Amino acid sequence: MRGINEPVLKDYINQLIGSDIRATVLSVKQLIGRMIFNIIGPFIGWINDLYTLQIALFMSGIIFFVPGLVSLFFLRRLKVV
């Protein structure tokens, strides 16, 4: 997903945001992504150590699917998507 996500979001941000703050917005986007990984990554590793890789990946899918679904709901409600 990251391979698809990155160019699409960068293009979208480049179209929406003015050049005066574009670098800041892209940097904050990267920072938030790294922070999410730093919070969730150890938890997924811990699940993998306790159970199996399959369960850890399943939990990872749930962790990212639920907020994604909520975000999609709000984006549709605001008529962004």
Image (spheres, rainbow, N blue to C red):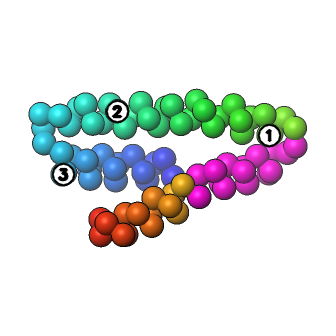
Q: Earlier in the sequence, mark 3 or mark 2?
A: 3
Q: CA distance from mark 2 to mark 1?
A: 29 Å
Q: Residue at x 49, y 32 (%)?
A: 34
Q: Residues within 10 Å of mark 2 (few under 14, many from 20)?
A: few
Q: Earlier in the sequence, mark 3 or mark 1?
A: 3
Q: Residue at x 51, y 52 (%)?
A: 1
* 10 on left or right of 49: left
Query: In the rendering, at what x and y percent does residue 21 appear?
Result: 17, 34
Q: Secondary structure at mark 3?
A: helix
> What label sits on residue 47 in the rendered view?
1
Q: Secondary structure at mark 2?
A: helix
> Which amino acid, by three-letter code, is at mark 3?
Gln
Label 3 or label 2, whichever lies nearer to me, is 2
Q: CA distance from mark 3 to mark 1?
A: 40 Å
Q: Secondary structure at mark 1?
A: helix
Q: Residues within 10 Å of mark 1 (few under 14, many from 20)?
A: some
Range of magenta residues: 51-66
User: Is 12 above or below relative to 24?
Assistant: below
Tell me the chief SS of the magenta region: helix
Residue 56 is inside the magenta segment: yes
Q: Residue at x 56, y 35 (%)?
A: 37
> Which amino acid, by three-letter code, is at mark 1?
Ile
Based on the displayed image, in which of its 4 quarters is residue 45 positioned?
Answer: top right
> What label sits on residue 39 in the rendered view?
none
Residue labelled with disc 3: 15
Q: Nearer the viewer, residue 11 or 46?
A: 46
Q: CA distance from mark 3 to mark 2?
A: 17 Å
Residue labelled with disc 2: 28
Q: Earlier in the sequence, mark 2 or mark 1?
A: 2
Query: In the rendering, at what x and y percent does residue 4 appear?
Result: 43, 53
Q: Residues within 10 Å of mark 3 (few under 14, many from 20)?
A: few
